[in-house]
Amino acid sequence: MKNILICGPPGVGKTTLIKKILKELKLRVGGFYTEEIKESGNRVGFKIISLAHQEGVLAHINIQGPKRVGRYGVNIYDLENIGVKSLDQALKVDDLIIIDEIGKMEIFSDKFKEKVRECLNSEKPVLSTIGIGGDKFTSQIKERDDVIIFKINLKNRDELMERILPLILRKNLR
């Protein structure tokens, strides 16, 4: 299994686990992660941050338009110009590809879905987060023969790093 998926509900620690794993790796890693945007302690959106330190807004309550998840409008422009481009770069030069996350907001972009398929089909290992539910696209990813899924929850989130890290290192030491 070369593609590792971390699956769990919002707020359980998927991105935190990815960041902890990244701190332990001495590999060339590319891709992106997401973070909450808070104002006065309230979540108002999500940032998208490439591992090359480019940053944009993935979704925000003030973004208008038809592409919405709950109260958040999705910013396809930043998703494609930061997220998709970071995946494209990772395919060219990095040892490991990070995709945080394959979720409801991201799958509004056909370019994103195409690039995710390309990453998963490449020879490079992928470490990704993915939502619990999903549409046809995310279901197909979870059903692939070359993925292993780790279901994260509040009880196991600390021990998962010890299970995932050796898998990544084994794949990159070949």
Image (cartoon, helix red, strand yellow):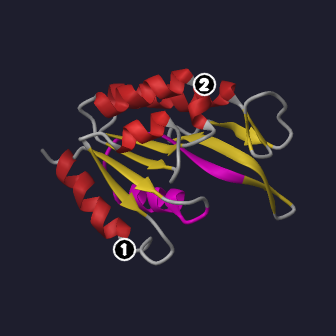
Q: Is 7 inside the magenta-drawn segment?
A: no
Q: Which amino acid, mark 2?
A: Asn
Q: Which amino acid, mark 1?
A: Glu
* Residue 20 x %, y %: 44, 62
Q: Residue at x 28, y 29 (%)?
A: 122
Q: Residue at x 24, y 44 (%)?
A: 2
- Residue position for label 1: 159
Please, is residue 51 above or below residue 93 in the view?
A: below
Q: Residue at x 19, y 47 (%)?
A: 171
In which quarter of the view is residue 61 placed?
A: top right
| Label 1: few (<14), some (14–19) or many (≥20) C-alpha neighbours in 10 Å | few
Disc number for residue 62: none
Q: Is residue 111 left or right of residue 121?
A: right
User: Magenta segment, which residues?
Assistant: 11-36
- Residue position for label 2: 81
* Residue 99 x %, y %: 46, 42
Indicate the quadrant containing the C terminus: top left, top right, bottom left or bottom right.
top left
Label 1 element class: loop
* Residue 8 x %, y %: 50, 59
Q: Between residue 124 and residue 153, name the one nearer to us.
A: 153
> Do we see residue 84 in this rendering?
yes
